[in-house]
Image (tube, coloured by chain):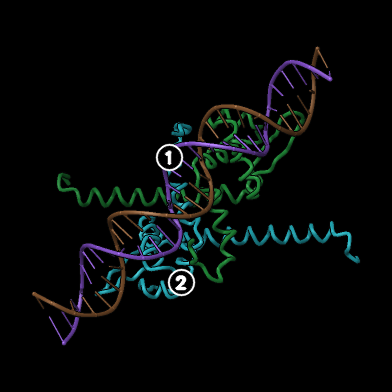
Chain colours: A green, B cyan, C brown, D purple
DNA sequence: TAGTCAATTAACTGTATAGCTATATAATGT
DNA sequence: ACATTATATAGCTATACAGTTAATTGACTA
């Protein structure tokens, strides 16, 4: 058993929040809900995720407060209830793009085969 | 073997970035570097993390572009190279705090023992 | 060059979890 | 009540990885 970790338990919910956003499948779900509310079948069709697996991810996202669950008759609709999610993703995407550009520039500079 | 996932490979770096921030130990490291550059021993003392474990986390954080590694003589100094990290953590913390307050309010409203 | 201290890496174990199949629950129609 | 369709859950396997101990590398010094 690991023992580590001290008086830092206030970090737990923060880490958990990031963890929910750290899976491609869940990011896919969030993205496919950007255009609006969808039920589980629609999300499944849009993402290609298996039914049971999808259900688990939806539960996690809902528990994290990222999605809202709205049963409606026989089906269940989900929507992104936390705009912060998009904001976070955008910030990270921008940063990644920025880094890739820097790397490209660096590569060009280092490239001995370049004709410049 | 799972097969899932489609044309969504552009999400991989985003998920990876969030994953790096999804561990308490790594958040601890980031926080303890908020006050400035520290070497590995100092970070170890501040966080209580084991030496080898710490080293692995530092490597991950550096590879993610969150920390910068500065060897200096016999020891190696690290610093947060990406201010976005703090920004993300603050956003998430604020949101969590907000939710906890809402829950508390909700609890008070539901509480039959309340004297109000 | 041998010795020492700092940091990294290798190898291992235990735990968490993504995705799977099969089953159960829930809402609606016959 | 029974069948049907939509979600959710249980149970399983394989993989990823945090934390551990032990060995290794690297920089400096006597």
Tell me which chain the residue with mark 1 is part of: B
Residue A24: give x, y in percent of width and height.
49, 41
CB-based contact (under 8 Å), mark 2 and mark 1: no
Tell me which chain the residue with mark 2 is part of: B
| Closer to the camera in the image, A67 or C17 | C17
Residue B71: give x, y in percent of width and height.
28, 69
Identity of the residue drawn at 62% across and 40% down:
A58
Residue B99: give x, y in percent of width and height.
69, 57
Looking at marks 2 and 1 on the same chain, the residue that comes earlier in the sequence is marked by 1
| Closer to the camera in the image, B53 or B16 | B53
Measure how far apart labels 2 and 1 are at the Cα level: 36 Å
To which quarter of the image does residue C1 belong?
A: bottom left
Identity of the residue drawn at 35% across and 64% down:
B68
Which mark, residue B48?
2
Up/down of A6 relative to A45, above or below: below
Up/down of A98 relative to B69, above or below: above
Which mark, residue B10?
1
């Amino acid at each position: 058993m690991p023992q580590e970790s001290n008086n830092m338990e206030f970090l737990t919910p923060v880490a958990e929040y990031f963890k929910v956003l750290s899976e491609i499948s869940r990011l896919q779900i969030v993205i496919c809900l950007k255009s609006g509310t969808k039920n589980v079948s629609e999300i499944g069709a849009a993402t290609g995720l298996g039914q049971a697996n999808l259900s688990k991810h939806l539960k996690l996202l809902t528990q994290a407060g990222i999605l809202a669950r709205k049963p409606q008759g026989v089906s269940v609709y989900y929507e992104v209830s936390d705009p912060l999610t998009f904001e976070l993703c955008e910030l990270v995407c921008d940063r990644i793009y920025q880094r890739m550009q820097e790397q490209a520039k660096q590569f060009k500079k280092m490239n001995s085969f370049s004709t410049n």
